[in-house]
Amino acid sequence: MIRLVYSFFSYTRRIILCLVRFWLYASLKYVVLGWTSDVVTMSIKGHKIHLRWKTSDRRTFDQVFLDNEYKADYVWDISTIVDAWANIWLSAIWFHLSYPDARIYSIEPQEENFALLTKNCANISNITLLHNAIRPVETELSLENWLDMGYWGCRYDALTHGTWVHTVTLPWLFDSYSFESIDILKVDIEWAEKELFEKNISWIQRVSNIAIELHDRFKHWCSYSFFSSVKALSYSYFQRWENIFLLWLDKDEVPA
């Protein structure tokens, strides 16, 4: 009988200890992962990044760092990268870690995203930040959170409400920052790619590689506009997750 009682209390003690350990682990995880706060800080290869864990930032982090959605075997040496839109800098830090000598131009129109982008990029000298949208012409447009999709679902258009933002063009970037070519152009601009590749596209001859997410599900003819703009060029093509990659072929590899 005594042995039975001792065994009962012994097993009960083990169960209680397991529950306490689980509670401590869950509590620690609750705090560390930021479930009690709006912004979490983590380190990626020595670079501190700040995420709004309860928002679309978390999914963006998964796509960029876990899914490696921008990884490609680029033919050309990478020295100049244009990141449009940069969101909170996760794609920019991925490019920086992959090509540490490259100059990166990060374009982001959404005000809260840009504030976090600035914080995340504070100690990286080869990243230039631009609080703008990108379009085929320079103008002022209104930005809104379309369909309540969070920080990664903003669009800009000729609206009468929302936050106003100045747009820049790719020729303006070439002239303002005095570079001759873009080695990687990353484009994820919520269907504005239709207009970007529809007119004033002489700059495309100065781009070596493009990584783009097309948004025909939201606006018709995005894909048509993009592929029409590159139809005269020789490139290899593949898709990873949501992104389409066009890698321009080296002159020695262009088929006759």
Image: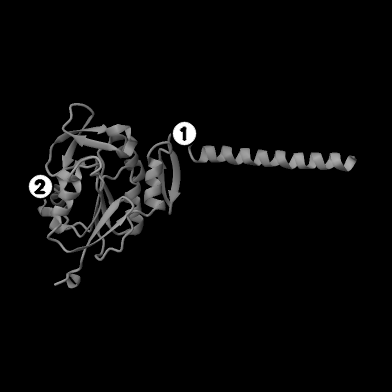
Q: Is residue 84 left or right of residue 38?
A: left
- Residue at 12%, 60% (x, y): give it: 232
Q: Quadrant of residue 86?
A: top left
Indicate the amino acid at tag 1: Ser
Nearer the observer: mark 2 or 1; the answer is 2
Mark 2 or 1, nearer chain start: 1
Q: Secondary structure at mark 2?
A: loop
**Residue at label 2?**
199
Q: Sort mark 1 into few (<14), some (14-19) or many (20+) by Cα contacts within 10 Å.
A: few
- Residue at 18%, 26% (x, y): give it: 160
**Residue at label 1?**
37
- Expressed as whole percent of the image width and height from the top left, the position of residue 29 reads 54, 41
The CA distance from mark 2 to mark 1 is 44 Å
Q: Is residue 238 left or right of residue 134?
A: right
Q: Quadrant of the N terminus?
A: top right
Indicate the amino acid at tag 2: Lys
Query: Which residue extends farthest right?
Result: 1
Q: Quadrant of residue 13?
A: top right
Q: Is residue 141 left or right of residue 99?
A: left
Count numbered badges in the picture: 2
- Expressed as whole percent of the image width and height from the top left, the position of residue 94 reads 35, 53
Q: Tell me the number on the disc at residue 127.
A: none
Q: Sort mark 2 into few (<14), some (14-19) or many (20+) by Cα contacts within 10 Å.
A: few
Query: Relative to 78, is 22 above or below?
Result: above
Query: Relative to 193, is 143 above or below?
Result: above
